[in-house]
Image: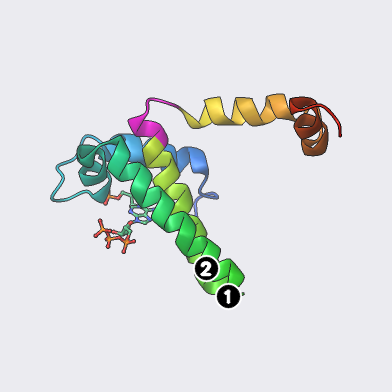
Amino acid sequence: MIPATGERAFTLGDLERLIGERAGAMSDTSYTRSLLDAGVPRIAKKFGEEAVEAVIAAVEKDRPALLSEAADVIYHLLVLLHAANLSLDQVVSELGRRTRQSGHEEKASRRPAT
Ligand SMILES: N=c1c2ncn([C@@H]3O[C@H](COP(=O)(O)OP(=O)(O)OP(=O)(O)O)[C@@H](O)[C@H]3O)c2ncn1[C@@H]1O[C@H](COP(=O)(O)O)[C@@H](O)[C@H]1O
């Protein structure tokens, strides 16, 4: 059950559940459903466009725009994961696995030191 505004903090898990629910709606009433109908390549393209818009906002130091574009990026990523049959839990598990070493260590382990 997704909380009403003010009941408790909204979470990414809530958004993932909402996306799963809206996947069962009609495309004329749900943007989520219309994205899913368009397929993974189209959703991936939308995700990329939103990411570029976030990049532009960051480079222009437009914090309100970056906040808004970051929300668009996360929403479209969760729709993309849903379409690819991957869950937020799986992504979080992968992030958890990575906490065993720093990003610098991980990168260094990919190629011989020069
Ligand atoms: N968080 C979001 C969310 N963020 C962004 N968007 C939509 O993403 C779209 C991106 O806008 P753009 O202007 O970049 O793209 P566009 O011009 O509309 O699309 P194209 O012409 O490029 O295809 C807009 O239609 C936004 O409304 C979202 N749509 C839905 N949600 C969440 O999903 C829930 C279910 O939505 P529906 O599936 O539409 O009921 C909503 O209640 C929200 O919680």
Q: Is residue 44 visible?
A: yes
Rendered-image quadrant of the C terminus: top right
88 relative to 28, above or below: above
Q: Position of residue 19 (x, y in %)?
A: 34, 40
15 sits left or right of 93 in the view? left
Q: Kindly tell me whether mark 2's CB lies below 8 Å from ligand 1.
A: no
In-front residue for pair 113/42: 113
- The quarter of the rendering in which ligand 1 is drawn is bottom left
17 sits left or right of 12 in the view? left
| Residue 20, numbered circle | none
Q: Residue at x 54, y 25 (%)?
A: 90
In-front residue for pair 87/110: 110
Q: Magenta includes 35?
A: no
Query: On the image, numbered disc 2 is attached to which residue?
Result: 56
Q: Residue at x 77, y 37 (%)?
A: 103
The crowding category of the residue bearing disc 1, from other C-alpha atoms within 10 Å (few below 14, some 14 to 19, many at least 20), is few
Q: Residue at x 42, y 48 (%)?
A: 75
Secondary structure of residue under mark 2:
helix
Query: On the image, numbered disc 1 is attached to which residue?
Result: 60
Amino acid type, label 1: Glu
Amino acid type, label 2: Ile
Q: CA distance from mark 2 to mark 1?
A: 6 Å
47 sits left or right of 92 in the view? left
Rendered-image quadrant of the N terminus: top left
Q: Position of residue 97 (x, y in %)?
A: 70, 24
77 relative to 49, above or below: above
Secondary structure of residue under mark 1:
loop
Find out whether the residues at labels 2 and 1 contact each other: C-beta distance under 8 Å.
yes
11 sits left or right of 35 in the view? right
Q: Position of residue 18 (x, y in %)?
A: 36, 41
Q: Which residues are magenta?
A: 81-86
